[in-house]
Each structure stands twice: as structure tokens, then as C-alpha cells.
Image (cartoon, rainbow, N blue to C red):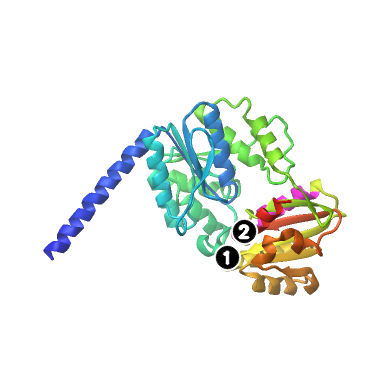
Amino acid sequence: MYIAFILLLILIILLGIEKFRLDRNIQKIKIRILVNGTRGKSTVVKYIAALLRQNEIKTFSKITGIVPTFAGPDGQPQIIKRRGGARVIEQLKMISEAARLNADAIVLECMSINPELQKLESRLLKPHFYIITNIREDHLEDMGKTPAEWAQSICSAIPEDTKVLTTETKHLETIKMYAEEIRSNVIHIDKIDLMEIAFDQPGIIKENFEIALALAKELKLKTSEFLEETLKQEEQSADHQRTINNCNVNFYNGFAINDVYSAEVYLKQINKKTSSNNKLVIIFNSRADRPMRSLRFAEMISKTKPDKCILTGDHQQATKRKLLKLGIKKENVIRWSTKQSKMVSESLKKVVDADTTLIGFGNIKGDGFEILNSLNKN
């Protein structure tokens, strides 16, 4: 009994020391920003960090949405190599490293799906700004099945005495309610002057720029060249042309889009850029641990009526059954193995022809990465 008491006392002392170190590191960083929401978190982190660096503010940033990556003051991305799954301790390490190198600012993407872990991240960072990009359906198994539950999951992580920036409209009153309870202030971003630039490039979202510029206003940052330069970089990186089977194919990488609403917006942007006569081929990369996502996308795909639907990932059979039930013809649903995903050009030879539009959706991990790597070799 005596030994157990001593061990417990030692544990409490060690935890106290660790808490002291964390608080000391936090206080060293003058600008702390946590980005949460459903879609666009990684992009918003990237934009905000670029703005801070352009204003000569020593900034550390970290994204987790597609490939876990951190960047120091020079802005050069470095991939985080994980042993096992994602853990909140990554955020602690980033805070410690930023403090050690005397960072002026840190911008982190909320990496947790579980609502309690989202709260933990907020408590750890104690952000001056908590950004909610939007609130949409995603990770239904963890965040709930209704819009009210999605909003609760994200809003319950709002920290005390912070500024909450958001472009979200549908759930604005819920955001305000949660913020007011803990003395936080909501700044709703609406109608930012973006110099009448047309945001018609698929995947380039106006609201992400608006969030970055609204934060710049709060921090009194210079924004003179940010918008035009960043938009130009985004457009240059969005190379959609691929040659497959001696055919011109327009490929749109929407694998990081894993909610139906965002996928529908993305499709509308693509339709504005392509001919209605183009053959439409959709690749849906599924996950067995996200069965509701598969069924929701099957419903969307059936309404879109593609010429072919290619299924990859590890939840293909259930997705195919749903597609067939919704009226998609059996011959228009194709299942790929991981081996076929690694050899996209070969696998697509009998699927694409002249003027094909090829779109990937659902999930970027696993077969999604294999498809991208293969296509980028063309």
C-alpha cells in the first residue's frame, strides 16, 4: 500500500512538471491559432501561415488532412513520419519545438475526430483564434448523424476567452451560443472584398481566402500581394491534363473531399470547365470503417449518372450493392484491386476514350495515394 502511494505521488509530480512545461511553452508563443471544421482546414492553415510569414512573423504550422506535414519559418514542408496512427501528442511536440526555436506564431490544424479529443487540443494550445471553416457531414460514426450533432462536436471544442472566426452560416447561432457560454467572441466573415476575382477553378474555395484575410485584419497584417500570388500558385498546381490510351483526359483530384455536399459543389465547378459531351468516369475510394460515407456517396453518384463508376478501397461490395439498388447498371460499375490502382493507365485503357472527365472522390489514403502516384507519372 505504501509503495503504491509513493508511485502515485511520483506520477502526480511528473504530470505537474509536464503541465508546467507545456504552459511555459504556450506562453512563449505570441500568436496561437487552431483551425477546425469539416472541409478546408489544411488549406486555411497553409494560407494563414503564408500570410504570417509574408509579414516576417516567425511561424510554425502543421496540417494533418492529407499528408501530415509541418513547416518552419522558411515554409518548406516536411512530412511527419508516424509509427502507428495519429495521436494528439503530435500537437504537443509541435508546440514544444516552436517554443524551443522562439516562434512568434503557431498555426495548427485540429487533428482529432473524436469530440473529447478536439476539446483536449483546444485546452493544450489555448489559441487566441479558433477558426471554424464550416460544419458539414463527415465521420458520421464519430461525430453523429445529424447536423446538430456535427455542430456540437466542433463547437464544444471552442476554448475560453478566444476569438472564433468562421464563414459558416447555417450553424452560426449554435456557434454563438457555445462561444458566449465561455466568454469567447464570434467574428462572422461575410463579403470580404476579393478584387472581383472569379473563383471558378475546381478545388479553389473563396471562403478559405476570406478566412485568411479576415484573420489578417484582426492581426493588422499586410495583404498586398497575398491573394493574387496564392491564387496563381493554386492554379498552376492544378494541372488536370493526362494522356491515357492516347486520349486526352481531364483528371480532377477530389479524393480529399469526403462529404457529399462538398463533392456536389466540386462537381458544379468541374461542369463549368468541361463540355457536357465529355464522358464522365468517377473513381470512389471507399473505407470499411466509414460505411455511412460509402452509402451517402453511392446516392450522390447515382444522381450524377456517370458513364462508369470505379470502386477502390476496402468497402467495395456494399457500395456496389447500393449503386445497383439505386439504378446504376451492373456493367457500369467496375471494381479495382490495389494492383489495378497502382497501374491506372493500364487499368483505364478500356474505360476512357477521347475527351473523358475523370474524378476521384471519397478518401485519399490507401488506393487513393496509389492512383495519384500512378497518374502523376503520366
Q: Position of residue 312 (x, y in %)?
A: 66, 65
Q: Position of residue 349 (x, y in %)?
A: 80, 62
Tag 1 residue = 290
Q: Is residue 261 left or right of residue 277?
A: left
The local secondary structure at tag 2 comes to loop
- Asked if the stretch drawn in magenta spans residue 260, the answer is yes
The amino acid type, in three-letter code, at marker 1 is: Arg
Using the rendered view, name the quadrant where residue 370 is placed.
bottom right
Is there CB contact under 8 Å for labels 2 and 1? yes
Residue 363 tag number: 2
Label 2 vs label 1, nearer the camera: 2
Pointer 1 local density, CA inside 10 Å: few below 14, some 14–19, many at least 20:
some
Mark closer to the chain start, 2 or 1: 1
Residue at 62% from the left image edge and 37% from the top image edge: 209
The local secondary structure at tag 1 comes to loop
Residue 145, placed above or below residue 156: below
The amino acid type, in three-letter code, at marker 2 is: Asn
- Give the extent of the magenta segment: 259-271
Q: Is residue 260 left or right of residue 75?
A: right
Q: Is residue 294 left or right of residue 276?
A: left
- The residues bearing labels 2 and 1 have C-alpha atoms spaced at a distance of 10 Å
Q: Main secondary structure of the magenta part?
A: helix
Residue at 56% from the left image edge and 40% from the top image edge: 46
Residue 222, placed above or below residue 83: above
Q: Position of residue 153 (x, y in %)?
A: 49, 55
- Asked if the stretch drawn in magenta spans residue 25, the answer is no
User: In which quadrant will I find the N terminus?
Assistant: bottom left
Using the rendered view, name the quadrant where residue 199 is placed.
top right
